[in-house]
Image (cartoon, helix red, strand yellow):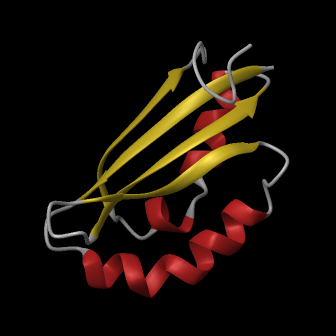
Amino acid sequence: MTIFAIHCLDKPASLELRLANREAHLAYAGSFKAHIKLGGPLLNEAGEMAGSMLIMEFDDIAQARAFSADDPYVKAGLFQRVDITAFKPTLGGFAS
């Protein structure tokens, strides 16, 4: 298994779209509870949600991409950018 950082930035002025899809996103992400190490919204300088960060464990990047592609936020067109990168924790609670 490999740990991946899934970093998503919202399109500008899209807070309403995020809020409209938040419940579906949380339900979807919750169905992958066994894969999630850490996750939550990114905040802008005003303290408003403006993106998402998930640290997740999958067999390979194809599974991470499939998870992301099926996320209700992605399907709603919320994000201007999604980056998925293999991640090796070396400090903190997830370090190996």
Q: Residue at x 56, y 18 (%)?
A: 86
Q: Quadrant of residue 91?
A: top right
Left or right: 37, with 84 as reference point: right
- Image coords of residue 37 (percent x, y): 70, 41
Q: Residue at x 52, y 32 (%)?
A: 5
Q: Residue at x 42, y 87 (%)?
A: 20
- Viewer-proximal residue among 76 and 14: 14
- Image coords of residue 51 (percent x, y): 34, 57
Q: Quadrant of residue 81?
A: top left
Q: Outermost residue, right direction?
A: 34
Q: Quadrant of the C terminus?
A: top right
- Viewer-proximal residue among 20 and 92: 92
Q: Quadrant of residue 52?
A: bottom left
- Image coords of residue 41 (percent x, y): 43, 60
- Above or below residue 27? Residue 78 is above
Q: Residue at x 51, y 78 (%)?
A: 22
- Above or below residue 10? Residue 72 is below
- Image coords of residue 35 (percent x, y): 78, 42
Q: Quadrant of the N terminus?
A: top right
How many numbered discs, if any? 0
